Image: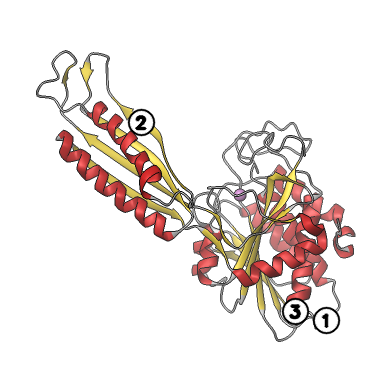
Amino acid sequence: MNIRKEIKEIEKMIIDWRRDFHQFPELSFQEHRTGDVIADELRSMGLEPKVKVGKTGVTADLKFGNGPVIGLRADMDALPIQETSGLPFSSQNDGVMHACGHDGHMAMLLGAAKALTQKDNQYNGTVRFIFQPAEEGEGGARYMIEDGCLEGIDEIYGIHVWNYQPVGEVGVKDGPVLAAADMFDIKIKGIGGHGAAPQGTVDSVVVASYLVQALQTIVSRNTNPLESTVISIGKINGGNNFNIIADEVSLSGTARAYSEENRNLIKTRMEEIIKGVEKTYNANITFDYKDGYPPTINHVGPTQKVLKAAEKVVGDKAGMPYLSMGGEDFAYYLKEKPGCFFFVGSAPNEQELFETPHHCSHFTMDERALLVGPSIYLNLLDNIMGT
Ligand code: NI
């Protein structure tokens, strides 16, 4: 690997930042200490951070002269998980853990800021460091955008450490890389009665069973098999006793798609199927579909720039990411501005890539990855802003 000299020199600093964030994780929109640490570090580098952007976010501009404005984004929040990793720098906040690697994202971005603020003025352009709260479900990106974090920005980039790829691999791909992650609730109202006398009842358990099966046909029969989609019902509630016909069942689930077209198709077909089932069984069904994050769709130009920058660090190990139907609110930035979201391999065990998945209580990462990300950023900015 070709780690940039400026990054290698501050390796300890980067790792210390990550471990500090790891010890004091904070949930979405509660990243107060995290934001304070980031702002202090940026100030000590001579920058003038804006705080409380998008509630608890921090941004800072480093201006080198006229030229493009490039945004680099790290997310800040942790998850409601009790850490079991056994690491010496484990979470000190009960029930809260950096189990997705956002601690690493912040450390990498601070590392890039440190290296860039020490740089002789050879660039044309401005780098905007964007530390964003609440990626895990609340869509902090939207609040950052509302507060103007994209103003004047020409391109935006973001990194996710990726435990499904070994250190030394970088996942870069144009087009969709993460899915739209929507949620839905379905309430079936039937007519209850004695388990031995179904006549005159509307059995909401039977309706629910039929509906679960029928909804799967959207993925298997309606969407293009070459385009990934998922519908999962994760929760069913209903019924009271073995000999009572249940009058009410509720279902909740998630729908995933890589394009707005498929997202809309799923929504429409769900409505149609639910209406049909309602009629078939004489039930009363309410359907509530909530849009989650949109699909994360990388732009071609910026993706090629990242690929070039990553190849300088990891050679031909820069390429396709391990794709996932997970969601990511970086998607909102990519709807507004050209950019690229890419994946830096961080698996602690190259042989067992699924040993420490994201969002598990024993999540940890190979910290060598933390030098790869900022090295790519420096190469990227050399290409975009270099004179
Ligand atoms: Ni994440």
Q: Residue at the location (69% across, 63% down)?
A: 39
Helix, strand or loop at label 3? It is helix
Q: Position of residue 47 (x, y in %)?
A: 74, 72
**Of pointers 2 and 3, the one earlier in the residue sequence:** 2
Single out the mark in the foreground, 1 or 3: 3
Residue 280: in sight, yes or no? yes
Q: Quadrant of the C terminus?
A: bottom right
Helix, strand or loop at label 1? It is loop
Q: Are marks 1 and 2 in contact (CB under 8 Å)?
A: no
| Residue topped by disc 3 | 385
Give above or below for 167 relative to 335. above
The amino acid type, in three-letter code, at marker 1 is Gln
**Of pointers 1 and 2, the one earlier in the residue sequence:** 1
Q: Position of residue 301 (x, y in %)?
A: 63, 72
Give the left or right position of residue 183, taking residue 286 as reference.
right
Q: Quadrant of the N terminus?
A: bottom right
The amino acid type, in three-letter code, at marker 2 is Ile
How far apart are the two marked residues, 2 and 3, measured between alpha carbons?
54 Å
The quarter holding residue 275 reads: top left
How far apart are the two marked residues, 1 and 2, measured between alpha carbons?
60 Å
| Residue topped by disc 2 | 236
Q: Residue at the location (35% across, 31% down)?
A: 236
